[in-house]
Image (cartoon, rainbow, N blue to C red):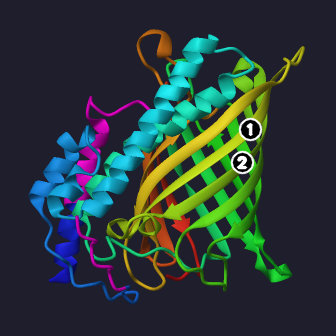
Amino acid sequence: MNDRFYRHRLAVFVLVCFIAAMSPAAPALAEEAPAAVAAEPGEPDEPDEVEPLAIAVAAVPGFVVHGAGHFVAGDSETGWKLLGAELAGVGLLVGGIGGLVVTGAADETITPLVGITALGGTTFFFSWLADIYGVSATGDGFGLPELERPPLAASVGYQYVYNPTFEFNHFVHAGAAGRLSAVGLPRLGLRGDGWFGVDDANWRARAQASWRFMGPLPDEAAADGSFLDAEFGLIYHDYSTYDFAEITGEALVRGRLDLHNYAEALRGSFVEAAFGYGLSQYAHEEHEDDAWSLLLFDASIGMYLGRSATGYGEFEIFYDHRHDGFAGGGKLTGLGSGAPGSMGARLTKSIAAPWGIQIGFEAGSAYVAGLDVVYRPGGSR
């Protein structure tokens, strides 16, 4: 009976989030609730009753007053926290956009001001989605995080790209990631990904090294799924059909916070963000262009799925500000076209651990959809 209950709640929540995220209103860019008792993996808390009215209020009028769903549900403490997050997002948006107007988007200040604007927009949007999640999920939510990460992960699959500027559409993707636990460096991670065109002479490769300051590691359990990483990457994208290539070097700081650390009612959900800087350059057959800088920022809000000890699962909605990927920048009308980044959703779920799938969709000036088979042995919740 519990399984049917959770499946029903999950279906309702994903449907509400999909409608909310695609709504024209969505941007391009009291008493303390009792603390939930942590459940053992595979043994969920006894679910509380979900209030349909609170979900409806959070989804519609709650877009204007974040936390409204929790106020209706009687959890005013979480409601005030989400309202505070909304106001912080609005303040960052106003400050960032106002700064761009006052400075005329001058080269000296445009990078930090665009970063502030993007952070404000995602804070506003994500605090709204957190309100919907909190009144849709009870107990420990829809799943548990991995407390020990696998030492190795690999994936292979298909990616479709629709970009009217180029002729390519179909790619094979392959990727692998691991931590050097075998040589006593579990905090050091290495990752490589490749996308290889099937219908065009086009391919993209990315190599990355990362260092984990805190968070889940192989054979070293963490308190929750929160983490903090430094990432360094190199990307090479070859457009042989058009006789040029793009080379990008990047450095980022990436962090995740499980949201029960902010409000207990949001247990089972998380936010993740990365800030960084990149240098990119086009290489032609006859000459090379000067390098230019890239503001790197991405953010997501998501929830954990499933409770089996050796399984894994996440669903997230994300914003990516970078413009050098397959999706490119946001396609809007007017002067703002191309300035924002892309938005999308991604589902990763074990089917028969350690095997699973990853499904993703991203929309910017181009549209990207992908399906991968995932192999992740050794992690645990």
| Above-or-below relation of 310 to 90 | below
Residue denoted by label 2: 252
Earlier-in-chain disc, 2 versus 1: 2
- Chain part drawn in magenta: 12-37
Number of residues whose C-alpha sits closer than 10 Å to that of mark 1, classed few (under 14), some (14–19) or many (20 or more):
some
- Judge by depth and name the residue closer to the eye, 92 or 326: 92
Q: Quadrant of the N terminus?
A: bottom left
Q: Residue at x 28, y 71 (%)?
A: 32
Q: Quadrant of residue 4?
A: bottom left
Q: Is residue 372 visible?
A: yes
| Above-or-below relation of 174 to 141 | above
Q: Residue at x 62, y 48 (%)?
A: 274
Q: Position of residue 5 (x, y in %)?
A: 17, 74
- Judge by depth and name the residue closer to the eye, 169 or 53: 53
Please give the label number shown on residue 277: 1
Q: Residue at x 72, y 48 (%)?
A: 252
User: Would you say the residues marked 2 and 1 are in contact, meaning their CB atoms lie under 8 Å apart?
Assistant: yes
Q: Is residue 366 visible?
A: no
Is residue 191 located in the magenta-colored stretch of the structure?
no
In this rendering, position of residue 350 left or right of residue 323: left
Q: Quadrant of residue 212?
A: bottom right
Spatial CA span between label 2 and label 1: 7 Å
Q: Amino acid at mark 2?
A: Leu
Q: Quadrant of residue 147?
A: bottom right
In the image, farthest residue toward the right: 287
